[in-house]
DNA sequence: ACAACATTTCGACTATCGTTGAATTATCGT
DNA sequence: ACGATAATTCAACGATAGTCGAAATGTTGT
């Protein structure tokens, strides 16, 4: 992770709509969500959503894949972890280790699948 | 931490200069650095640095305090940790805990004081 | 092939960001 | 009180971001 990569990622996250999209995808996990579902949940016009999804994609924070008519977006957890590590790197001159790590492979202890929270994602 | 607080913080970090300033302060720890020292290290004009320091301060990521003629800036580690937590909140529907925590109070095992790295902060 | 659906592309407009240089405020030493 | 130093404020300018609506692209089912 270099500084231009980091600023691109941070810039992508530095917007109400994109942050909401990103957090929705983080909560959703590797399965991701179709663009239309995201648009409906956040009440966005198609072209506006596309614009924001492109920002996040170009920053490398999310990935896209086509499934029939729909395009599924999902968090790139490696990129997310790299960004965290970059921000906290060498914290306090190396006094402490602050290495946040998300492991999407892990399942919940109760075995339930990740759900899409509804109320918390209102625009 | 709410979304507008988070976007403000992310927007503040989403700039080459401010990111370099922030990381410099993170590495420095609670002691912080005077504005002039930062300006000299990054080769910035006074007014430009002030502008960026204000962005970071208003976002709540850094604090300022006066010491004689100089104004010392330091990372607000609580704000930093809160931001990390917000980004990774409810990750994968709660499958994993990803809570990055920096504890500035801790000292290095070798007892050395945090130094300001030089080469890694070139603008 | 054709109509319906899902998403992206394009053009135009407004608002905000970031830089620069000159002037201003605050503090120190004498 | 005065000059020097440290940092901020202000005004002006160019560049980029974000929004909207209309049109275009790709995909499915019949």
Image (spheres, coloured by chain):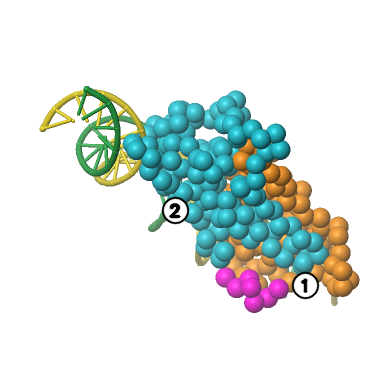
Chain colours: A orange, B cyan, C green, D yellow
Q: How many marks?
A: 2
Between B34 and B21, the one lying in front of the other is B34
Q: On the same chain: label 1 and label 2?
A: no
Residue at x-position 70% and y-position 47%:
A98
Residues at discs 1 and 2 in contact (Cβ within 8 Å): no
State which region is magenta: A117-123
User: Does the magenta portion include B112?
Assistant: no
A59 relative to A103, above or below: above
Residue at x-position 66% and y-position 59%:
B85
Q: Seen in the image, is B43 located left or right of residue A107?
A: left
Q: Seen in the image, is B28 located left or right of residue B51?
A: right
- Residue C24, located in which quarter of the rendered image? top left
Between C22 and D29, the one lying in front of the other is C22
Q: Quadrant of the C terminus of chain A?
A: bottom right
Q: Quadrant of the N terminus of chain A?
A: top right
Residue at x-position 65% and y-position 41%:
B107
Picture coordinates of residue A23 (x, y %)?
A: 67, 62
Q: Seen in the image, is A29 located left or right of residue D2?
A: right
The 10 Å Cα crowd at callout 1, few under 14, some 14 to 19, many 20 or more, is few
Between A81 and B118, the one lying in front of the other is B118
Picture coordinates of residue A66 (x, y %)?
A: 79, 58
Q: Is residue B28 visible?
A: yes
Q: Which residue is mark 1?
A: A115
Secondary structure, mark 1, is loop
The label number, if any, that marks residue B58 in the structure image: 2
How far is the residue under mark 1 from the one under mark 2? 35 Å
Badge nearest the viewer, 1 or 2:
2
């Amino acid at each position: 992770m270099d500084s231009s990569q980091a600023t691109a990622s941070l810039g992508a996250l530095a917007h109400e709509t994109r942050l909401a999209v990103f957090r929705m995808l983080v909560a959703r996990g590797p399965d991701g969500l179709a663009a239309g579902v995201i648009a409906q949940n956040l009440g966005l016009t198609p072209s506006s959503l596309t614009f924001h999804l492109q920002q996040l994609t170009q920053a490398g924070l999310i990935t896209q894949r086509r499934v029939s008519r729909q395009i599924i977006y999902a968090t790139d957890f490696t990129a997310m972890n790299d960004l965290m590590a970059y921000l906290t790197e060498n914290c306090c001159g190396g006094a402490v280790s602050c290495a946040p790590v998300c492991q999407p492979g892990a399942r919940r202890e109760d075995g339930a699948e990740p759900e899409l929270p509804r109320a918390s994602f209102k625009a």
